[in-house]
Structure formats: C-alpha cells, structure tokens
Amino acid sequence: MNKLYVLYDPKCELCCRLKNWILIQRSWIGIALIEQGSEKAKRLFPDLDRIAGKDDLAVISDEGAVYLNNSAWIMVLYAMVEYREWASRLTHPLLMPLARQAFAALSKNRHFLSRWISAEDPNDVADELRQVELEPCALPRNINESTSTVREYLQ
C-alpha cells in the first residue's frame, strides 16, 4: 500500500479541522484528501455510494481496501509516522468504538498524549477517550463494524 484516499465531509467542522491537521503530519503512506461527494470522488470511486453512506468517513487504499468510520480513523493514524503505534493500540475491542475521540484528541491536545502513553490498561485509555468532547458530526451507524481488516493489516 502506497496511498490512502481520505474522503471527508467539507461541511463538518471536525472533518475540516482534522483535514488541516493531516496535511501537516509526516506519513509513511501518501494521503490524498478528497471532498466527499465531489466530482473527483465520484470519478475515482464511482461505486462507493453502494458501500458507504453519506455520513460515513471513508478511507480507500490504492489497493482497493475500503475502511469506514472507526476503521478509517485508525487507518489514517496508521499512515502517520508519529501515530502508527497508537493505531495498533486502538484496535483493542474496548478502544475501537472510541477511535474518533482518539483522533480528535490527538489533533487537538498534545498533553493528552502523555496521559495516554503512560496508561498501560486499555480501561484507563478508554476512560481518557470518553472525556474527549466532539463537535457535531455523524457517528457511525454501527459501532461494532468489522475490524478484522484493520487488525490483520496492522499485525
């Protein structure tokens, strides 16, 4: 895998803030940010609307793998130099439903990182993530979405 395409909602404040944060991060894998529903997105991924809803965050690899919502947030972190280890950590079943909060916390508050790094127990990390306030944005329709593809790739 050499590139990830991140389809973000240009009307979502959180998505736009995170898009700007992604642009300044160093990454192992190239990241292309594309407005969801744009002509470019429709041209590159004409069948995506059969897989993802309009409120889903979608990440597509150059190999054709599609990651939605929490799995998508984790794949973006996996691509980044400083956050790959955290992407792996977020695949824990307790933390996976909190991936969006983790991404918001990472992009907003570096002090959060020191508390997270020092927490050995996933319950402690989950407690920290539950305290992260999110701007309004559509949450995943199914928080128990499949994580096997992400876990397999991260191993």
Image (spheres, helix red, strand yellow):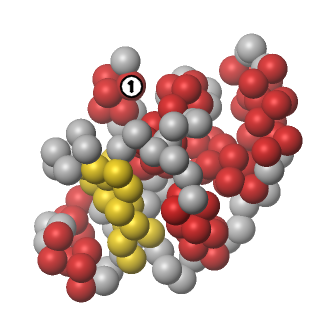
Q: What kind of element bears circle 1?
A: helix
Q: How many marks?
A: 1
Where is residue 6, by image quadrant? Answer: bottom left
x, y percentage for residue 59? 35, 54
Of residues 15 and 62, the one drawn nearer to the viewer in this rendering: 62
x, y percentage for residue 134? 72, 60
Which residue appears at 15% of the width and 77% of the height?
43
On-image quarter of the C terminus: top left
On-image quarter of the N terminus: top left
Q: Which residue is mark 1?
A: 154
Where is residue 124, by image quadrant? Answer: top right
Which residue appears at 16% of the width and 45% of the height?
63
Residue 118 higher or lower than 21, as above or below: above
Amino acid identity at mark 1: Leu
Residue 72 higher or lower than 1, as above or below: below
x, y percentage for residue 89? 57, 25
Which residue appears at 38% of the width and 25% of the height?
154
x, y percentage for residue 26? 51, 47
Which residue appears at 69% of the width and 21% of the height?
122
Where is residue 44, by image quadrant? Answer: bottom left
Position of 91 compared to 60: left or right? right
Q: Residues within 10 Å of mark 1 (few under 14, many from 20)?
A: some
Residue 58 in sight from this viewpoint: no
